[in-house]
Amino acid sequence: MTTRKLERVIPSIAASDGAGVKLRRSLGASQLARHDPFLMLDEFFSDDPDDYLAGFPSHPHRGFETVTYMLDGHMQHKDDHGNTGDLGPGDVQWMSAARGIIHSEMPQQTEGRMRGFQLWLNLPAKEKMKPAAYRDIASGEIPVRSVNGDAKAKVIAGKLGTTTGPIHGGSTDPYYFDLELAPGAVFEEALPAGHNAFLYVYEGEALVGESRQPVARRAAGLLSDGEKVRIEAGAALARVLLLAGKPLREPVVQYGPFVMNTREEMEQAIADYQSGVLSRGEIGRIEIG
């Protein structure tokens, strides 16, 4: 089995979003920093309420999926159809904005640590105008698999050996693992050949591939194609997100929270939002997995 190599490192940069929430952005920091089908990855992490209390007030999305994964803190989602979802430590919300949704994500705490990630995952052209849907996944629904006794993986999406996450299949067939590796521990597992894959190190350092190429904390590493991935922790405990998905190989036209395939579709999305019909229709529940 061929082992994937580290092809490119994208250091995260300081950014802010919503009403001024401070975060780190790796994928999505520029239009050249994408990895089909992945559009963006943000890490938010602060013990200072001034960095996150303003939250993400009501805003629209169309044409892609957002995946919010909380490590610490409490965030509440509300949308324009009256749905409410609460995310606590270890919880995930997998939302397919598709045709359109207008929602808010607001902290439900006034002190303490707020820490987590938001991933943007593109949808194929044939699914961009389907009804919006989402699924709140409690921490207890996410299986954890021990690997060689000194590493463990939370399987949020996809399959790891015989362990299947609550989300699997679909057009991009996403894999989303949260890895914890003891110092010097090695995670070496299969990933589907042909899927684009990357990792994001949020604690410690990771050494990638047979040549043990380093990826520092708060950086994303884009991987070559291959049949398996090898990630080794450095001298300290490492915590790493590992993601893979089937590339769409379609044009991407993005304007803020809208991601379409053509300029004409983008202009229609903006017009629909301005005229109040962006999110017309029912909101469904994602049943994949």
Image (cartoon, rainbow, N blue to C red):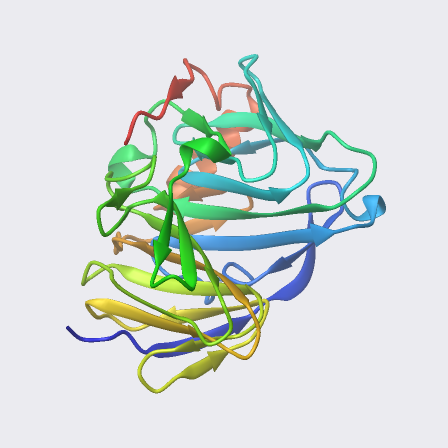
Q: Is residue 206 above or below residue 88?
A: below
Q: Is residue 86 left or right of residue 47?
A: left
Q: Quadrant of residue 26?
A: bottom right
Q: Is residue 96 visible?
A: no
Q: Looking at the picture, how far across and down is residue 141, in whole percent?
A: 41, 32
Q: Is residue 91 above or below residue 11?
A: above
Q: Single out the residue that lies furthest toward the bottom.
A: 211
Who's the residue at 69% across and 41% down the image? Answer: 18
- Where, quadrant-wise, is the N terminus in this rendering? bottom left
- Where, quadrant-wise, is the C terminus in this rendering? top left
Who's the residue at 77% across and 32% down the image? Answer: 109
Q: Is residue 123 left or right of residue 118?
A: left
Who's the residue at 25% across and 56% down the image? Answer: 249
Q: Is residue 78 above or below residue 120?
A: above
In depth, the one of 36 and 174 nearer the eye is 174
Q: Is residue 271 left or right of residue 188?
A: right
Q: Quadrant of residue 280?
A: top left
Q: Looking at the picture, how far across and down is residue 243, in whole percent?
A: 38, 56
Q: Single out the residue that lies furthest toward the left.
A: 1
Q: Looking at the picture, how far across and down is residue 153, in whole percent?
A: 40, 53
Who's the residue at 18% across and 63% down the image? Answer: 193
Q: Looking at the picture, how far across and down is residue 236, in whole percent?
A: 57, 74
Q: Disc count in the image?
A: 0
